[in-house]
Amino acid sequence: MSLSFFKGTIFLSISVLGIVGNIFIFLNYMHMFKSTKKKSIHIIFIHLAFTNIIMLLLKVIPKTLAAFGMENFLEDIGCMIFVYLERVTRGLSICTSSLLTLVQAITISPRDSVWRKLKIQSAWHILPLLLFFWIISSLISMNLLYHIKNISSMNTSQISKQDNYCYFVPDNLIMRWSFLALMVLRDAVFQGIMGVASGYMVFLLHKHHQRVLYLQNSNFLYKTSPEMKAAHSVLLLMLCFLFIYWTECILSLPFNSFLENNSMMKNIQEYLRIGYAILSPFMMIPKDSNLTGCWHSH
């Protein structure tokens, strides 16, 4: 058994696990959205799961087939579509996760809080925001449409031995840094929103915890609200996202500078890029009683 086949098997196994988990989240929140009171957060979870499914499929299909030595089925336009949409969905994951944190922080904020003024009145009002995320993520990744090529269209001297069908052809430095700056700006803005909203949720959860302790010591029965339970789940999701995102960023610095041909480092980066999409559904299921009950019934 070759090393490439072994790596392809592992990559396929964990990716399929993530796809199944996200499909489960997607279908269950779709059912909840149709059968219960429509909530903004349900639409966000549906969009996040959908984004994760597309990202994993775009990542796993060409990479796994290449690792298994399958015939190169992608032309230049196929590579362009796969890599471009993968980058777009990665951006959507950041934007959607940030929106999820903000909406949850607003949901659990006190009635007299300034945050309540930001509350979205109707679940359908969230759709223009999601459309805006698609637009900015699509525009920021536009340069990939001109610089992604299929391995078959390149000279063998230009190709390093990698288990992939698609390659990035270096472009104009000014153009590359311009799009990179826009991508960094987008990530910084949305992670800033995520950080502020997460910090506010930590503050509210701390106050809630103190109140619970006080009531328990006073012999009052106190039941944690579903909103507070959801806040714990969202906060855990955001910590997972930030850990994976910044770990990948830190590893990419030595990788790009000194370890360009280090296959182990490249594999770690590949797993980190899909880590959040794979882990997120399994972090959400135990925290949501509706999802847990449905999972056990299946």
Image (spheres, grey):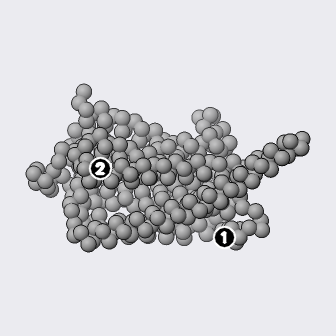
- Considering the image in quadrants, where does the C terminus appear? top right
* Relative image position of residue 129 (x, y in whole percent): 54, 69
Local SS, label 2: helix
Q: Which mark is residue 129?
A: none
Compare residues 115 and 23 and report the one nearer the observer. 115
Q: Quadrant of residue 112?
A: bottom right
Say whether disc 1 or disc 2 marks the residue closer to the N-terminus.
Answer: 1
Q: Mark 1 vs mark 2: give the one in front.
A: 2
Examine the rendering and report whether any part of residue 276 can be seen.
yes
Compare residues 91 and 195 and report the one nearer the observer. 195
Q: Is residue 264 left or right of residue 115?
A: left
Residue at numbered disc 2: 255
Q: Residue at x 21, y 62 (%)?
A: 170
Label pair 1/2, CB-CB below 8 angstroms: no
Q: Quadrant of residue 125?
A: bottom right
* Relative image position of residue 145 (x, y in whole percent): 28, 65
* Relative image position of residue 51 (x, y in whole percent): 47, 55
Q: Residue at x 44, y 52 (%)?
A: 245
Residue at numbered disc 1: 118
Q: Is residue 109 left or right of residue 31?
A: right
- Considering the image in quadrants, where does the N terminus appear? top left
Q: Residue at x 58, y 48 (%)?
A: 236
Q: What amino acid type should be assigned to the residue bearing mark 2?
A: Phe
* Relative image position of residue 279 (x, y in whole percent): 50, 43
CA gap, disc 1 and disc 2: 41 Å
User: Which class describes the residues within 10 Å of circle 2: few (<14), some (14-19), or many (20+)?
Assistant: some
Q: What amino acid type should be assigned to the residue bearing mark 1?
A: Leu
User: Which class describes the residues within 10 Å of circle 1: few (<14), some (14-19), or many (20+)?
Assistant: few
Examine the rendering and report whether any part of residue 43 can be seen.
no
Compared to residue 199, the image places residue 7 above or below, namely: above
Q: Residue at x 54, y 45 (%)?
A: 281
